[in-house]
């Protein structure tokens, strides 16, 4: 039984006034979301303002990154305890922009995942292949490697408190989404791995989101696939109305959790 989850990744967008307006728009448009959980991940600087707007609403919030240490001489970094203190429910880790633009390694990501869990945050681990890797037939090899490395050393109960996102790099911010069949194939493969790495029960309950050019007009076709449990939304999460539509289209049919 998995309630779909739709997460807005605002990336480096959202000065305070814009962040308040966008979060208020989402809150007001999703007063009682049925069959879907929703969260917003603004930049660090907007987290307190967004938290203030969303407090008392069913919409959660989270961050886009964190460091693996709690505190220390790490100029410019933010520790997971600092995020927990702001009421964050989630932290996105291993996003391809962090992997490719900021050279984050699988080892860095694994340390961040473990640190997030220690602070009661749900790590939303992103995995996905580049266009070249897909062309070479390496999609499963790449996502498996990223998943095994990102969850290295975790106990089954820690894996059960996690969220996964399949984000093909070639689909992020390009307007070219994976087809529902392409995404479903990888999601099914990932779910099989979760079963191996944790348990069959965890594989049935763990949410695997799809991310990569999700828009209001393709959200239903993607998120109604049996193994796709919601969406990680970048560009389209910057417009309240569009994001609300994506959330509603991602809800389980009948407003109840899907198997
Ligand atoms: C993302 O950055 O996680 C993402 C999926 O971006 P977009 O929706 O813009 O492709």
Image (cartoon, rainbow, N blue to C red):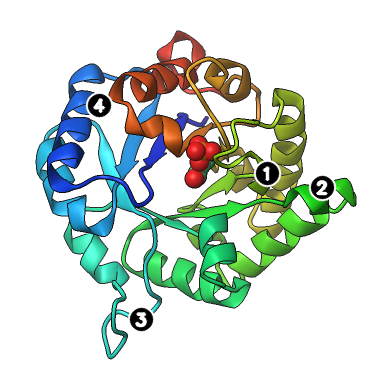
Q: Which one is nearer the viewer's eye here, 80 or 257?
A: 80
Q: Which residue is mark 1?
A: 170
- The 10 Å Cα crowd at callout 1, few under 14, some 14 to 19, many 20 or more, is many
Q: Earlier in the sequence, mark 2 or mark 3?
A: 3
- Sort mark 2 into few (<14), some (14-19) or many (20+) by Cα contacts within 10 Å: some
Gap between marks 3 and 4 measured at Cα = 32 Å
Q: Which residue is mark 3?
A: 69
Whether the residues at callouts 4 and 1 have beta carbons within 8 Å, the answer is no
Q: Residue furthest right?
A: 136
Q: CA distance from mark 2 to mark 4?
A: 35 Å
Which residue is at a point 50% across and 12% down the rendered structure image? 253
Mark 1 to mark 3 CA distance (whole Å)? 31 Å
Instruction: Identify residue for label 2.
Output: 134
Q: Say if mark 1 contacts mark 2, CB within 8 Å.
A: yes
Residue 138: image location, x then y, percent = 85, 53
Secondary element under disc 4, as helix, strand or loop, is helix
Q: Earlier in the sequence, mark 3 or mark 4?
A: 4
Residue that carries the numbered disc 4 in the rendered image: 26
| Real-space CA distance between mark 2 and mark 3, rounded to the nearest whole angstrom | 34 Å
Distance of mark 1 from mark 2, alpha carbons? 9 Å
């Amino acid at each position: 039984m998995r309630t779909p989850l739709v997460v807005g990744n605002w990336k480096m967008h959202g000065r305070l006034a814009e962040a308040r307006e966008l979060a208020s728009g989402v809150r007001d448009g999703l007063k009682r979301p049925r069959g879907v959980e929703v969260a917003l991940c603004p930049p660090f600087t907007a987290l307190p303002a967004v938290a203030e707007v969303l407090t008392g609403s069913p919409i959660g919030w989270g961050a886009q990154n964190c460091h693996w240490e709690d505190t220390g001489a790490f100029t410019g970094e933010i520790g997971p305890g600092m995020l927990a203190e702001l009421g964050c429910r989630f932290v996105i880790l291993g996003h391809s922009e962090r992997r490719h633009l900021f050279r984050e390694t699988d080892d860095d990501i694994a340390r961040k995942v473990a640190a997030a869990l220690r602070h009661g945050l749900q790590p939303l681990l992103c995995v996905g292949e580049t266009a070249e890797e897909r062309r070479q037939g390496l999609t499963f090899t790449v996502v498996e490697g990223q998943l095994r490395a990102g969850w290295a050393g975790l106990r089954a109960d820690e894996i059960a408190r996690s969220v996964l996102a399949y984000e093909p790099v070639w689909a992020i911010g390009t307007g070219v989404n994976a087809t529902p069949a392409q995404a479903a194939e990888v999601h099914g493969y990932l779910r099989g791995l979760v079963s191996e790495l944790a348990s069959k029960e965890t594989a049935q309950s763990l949410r695997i989101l799809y991310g990569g050019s999700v828009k209001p007009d393709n959200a239903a076709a993607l998120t109604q696939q049996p193994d796709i449990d919601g969406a990680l939304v970048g560009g389209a999460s910057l417009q309240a109305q569009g994001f609300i539509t994506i959330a509603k289209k991602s809800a389980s049919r009948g407003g109840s959790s899907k198997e």
